[in-house]
C-alpha cells in the first residue's frame, strides 16, 4: 500500500517500515522525529501481532508527545487498540480518519472491517484516489476481482502515477493475469507487461 500526498507522512502507512530520508517533510530529519517514527513502527508491529496492550501503551505516548502528523496517526491506532480490547473510543467520522482506520485494518488483514471503513470514507469523499486504491487492494486480497478492477480504474483515472505503484504492490498479485488489470497498469507508456510462464 501507499500513502497519498497531503495525508499522514509518506512511508508511515499504517504500520509500514520507517520512511526514507527523501520522503520526509523538510525539517523532519531531527532525532526526536526519528525516535517517534521508530516507536510508531514498534507499536505497529505489536498491533499486527494483535498485542494490543503493548501497542496501546506506545500509541498513547506518541499521541501525546510525537510531532503532529505522527500524533494524529497514533491517536487513530490507539482507538483501534481500544476497540480491540473492548474499551470503546470515539468512532472516526471524517473521511481521513475512516481511511486511516481502513488502512490499519487492511494491513492487519481484517479485510471485512477494512472495506467497511473504506466504504464509509468513499461515501464521504468519493473522489479520493487513495481511498479507491485501498478499496481495490482490500477487494483484491478477498478475491473480489470485479470490485478490485473497478476501484483500480477510478484510482488510476484520478492519479495516473498510481499505475506504477500498483505494479509494485503485492496486494494485487492475484490480479496479475487478468487482462483488464494488465491493460490498466501497463498502458500509458510504461514498461511492457512481463510475460508469465
Image: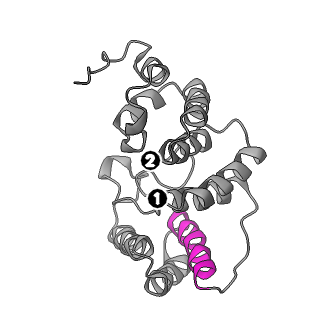
Q: What residue do we see at 58% from left, 67% from top?
A: 72
**Do tag 1 and tag 2 residues touch (Cβ < 8 Å)?**
yes
Does residue 5 show up? Answer: no
Magenta stretch bounds: 68-85
Residue 165 in which image quadrant? top left
In front of the other: 63 or 123: 123
Is 72 situated above or below 135?
Answer: below
How many residues crowd mark 2 within 10 Å: few (<14), some (14–19), many (20+)?
Answer: many
Residue 77 in which image quadrant? bottom right
In front of the other: 24 or 123: 123
The residue labelled by disc 2 is 1
User: What x and y, as percent, mark residue 50?
Assistant: 45, 77
Q: Taking 77 as reference, is 124 left or right? A: right
User: What x and y, as percent, mark residue 53?
Assistant: 48, 87
Q: Taking 69 as reference, is 23 left or right? A: left
Is 179 situated above or below 102?
Answer: above
Secondary structure beneath disc 1? helix
User: What x and y, as percent, mark residue 156?
Assistant: 54, 27
Is 36 inside the magenta-drawn segment? no
The residue labelled by disc 1 is 107
User: What x and y, as percent, mark residue 4?
Assistant: 53, 44
- In terms of sequence position, does the residue under pointer 1 or pointer 2 come before the other? 2
Amino acid at each position: 500500500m501507499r500513502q497519498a500526498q497531503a495525508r499522514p507522512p509518506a512511508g508511515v502507512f499504517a504500520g509500514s517500515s520507517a520512511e526514507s530520508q527523501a520522503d520526509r517533510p523538510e525539517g523532519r530529519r531531527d532525532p526526536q522525529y526519528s525516535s517517534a517514527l521508530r516507536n510508531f513502527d514498534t507499536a505497529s508491529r505489536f498491533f499486527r501481532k494483535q498485542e494490543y496492550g503493548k501497542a496501546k501503551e506506545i500509541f498513547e505516548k506518541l499521541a501525546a508527545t510525537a510531532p503532529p502528523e505522527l500524533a494524529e496517526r497514533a491517536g487513530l491506532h490507539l482507538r483501534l487498540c481500544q476497540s480491540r480490547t473492548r474499551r470503546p473510543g470515539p468512532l472516526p467520522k471524517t473521511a481521513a480518519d475512516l481511511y486511516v482506520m481502513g488502512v490499519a485494518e487492511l494491513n492487519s488483514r481484517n479485510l471485512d472491517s477494512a472495506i467497511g471503513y473504506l466504504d464509509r470514507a468513499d461515501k464521504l469523499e468519493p473522489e479520493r484516489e487513495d481511498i479507491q486504491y485501498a478499496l481495490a487492494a482490500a477487494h483484491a486480497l478477498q478475491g473480489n476481482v470485479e470490485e478490485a478492477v473497478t476501484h483500480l480504474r477510478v484510482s488510476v483515472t484520478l492519479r495516473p502515477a498510481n499505475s506504477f505503484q500498483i505494479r509494485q504492490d503485492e496486494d494485487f498479485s492475484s490480479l496479475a493475469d487478468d487482462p483488464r488489470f494488465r491493460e490498466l497498469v501497463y498502458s500509458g507508456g510504461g514498461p511492457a507487461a512481463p510475460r508469465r510462464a
